[in-house]
Image: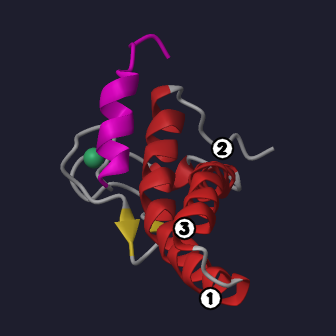
C-alpha cells in the first residue's frame, strides 16, 4: 500500500453513509449492515472489521452529552427523579440509535483510510 488516503475526506464520506473510496456508492444496506462491496466502485467495504468500535465511540459521546443534560435538567426544572429518568432515558435511546449509524460510517471511513482490512486471523 503506497498511495496516501485522505483521512478527513474518508471520515466525512463515511459519516454520511457513503463509500470512502468514491463517495458515490452507499455503505449500508438497511440500518447498520455494511454492503460487501461498493456498488459504484467495487471497494470491498465488508472487509473492514468495525466490530465494537462504533458502539464504544457512540456510548462515549452519548455519556459525555448525558452528564450536562442531567445537571441542567436537575437544576433548572427540579423535576421528580422518575420523570427525569423517563424523559432522559427516551432522549438517550433515540440519540444513541441515530448517532450509531453515523459513527459506524465514520469508523469504517477511518479503517479504510488506514487500510485496516480484516486479515482473516
Ligand atoms: Zn465506492
Q: CA distance from mark 1 to mark 2?
A: 45 Å
CB contact under 8 Å: marks 3 and 1: no
Q: Secondary structure at mark 2?
A: loop
Nearer to us in this view, 11 or 48: 11
Residue at 42% x, 64% y is: 35
Q: Which mark is residue 96?
A: 3
CB contact under 8 Å: marks 3 and 2: no
Q: Secondary structure at mark 1?
A: helix
Mark closer to the observer (1, 2):
1
Q: CA distance from mark 3 to mark 1?
A: 20 Å
Q: Position of residue 43 (x, y in %)?
A: 37, 45
Mark closer to the observer (3, 2):
3
Residue 67 is left or right of residue 105, and the answer is: right
Residues in magenta, as a range:
1-16
Which class describes the residues within 10 Å of circle 1: few (<14), some (14-19), or many (20+)? few
Is 12 colored magenta in this rendering? Answer: yes
Q: Secondary structure at mark 3?
A: helix
Which class describes the residues within 10 Å of circle 2: few (<14), some (14-19), or many (20+)? few
First-in-chain label (1 vs 2): 1
Residue at 44% x, 49% y is: 44
Q: Which residue is mark 2?
A: 118
Residue 95 is left or right of residue 56, and the answer is: left
Residue 116 is left or right of residue 109, and the answer is: right
Q: CA distance from mark 3 to mark 2?
A: 26 Å
Q: Position of residue 41 (x, y in %)?
A: 25, 46
First-in-chain label (3 vs 2): 3
Mark closer to the observer (3, 1):
1
Asked if the residue at label 2 sits under 8 Å from ligand 1, the reply is no
Quadrant location of residue 11? top left
Q: Which mark is residue 83?
A: 1
First-in-chain label (3 vs 1): 1
Amino acid at each position: 500500500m503506497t498511495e496516501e488516503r485522505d483521512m478527513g475526506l474518508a471520515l466525512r464520506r463515511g459519516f454520511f453513509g457513503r463509500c470512502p473510496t468514491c463517495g458515490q456508492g452507499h455503505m449500508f444496506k438497511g440500518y447498520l449492515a455494511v454492503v460487501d462491496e461498493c456498488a459504484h466502485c467495487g471497494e470491498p467495504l465488508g472487509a473492514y472489521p468495525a466490530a465494537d468500535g462504533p458502539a464504544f465511540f457512540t456510548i462515549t459521546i452519548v455519556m459525555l452529552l448525558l452528564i450536562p443534560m442531567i445537571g441542567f435538567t436537575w437544576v433548572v426544572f427540579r423535576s421528580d427523579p422518575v420523570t427525569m429518568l423517563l424523559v432522559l432515558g427516551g432522549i438517550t435511546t433515540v440519540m444513541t440509535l441515530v448517532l450509531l449509524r453515523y459513527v459506524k460510517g465514520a469508523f469504517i471511513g477511518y479503517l479504510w483510510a488506514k487500510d485496516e482490512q480484516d486479515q482473516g486471523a
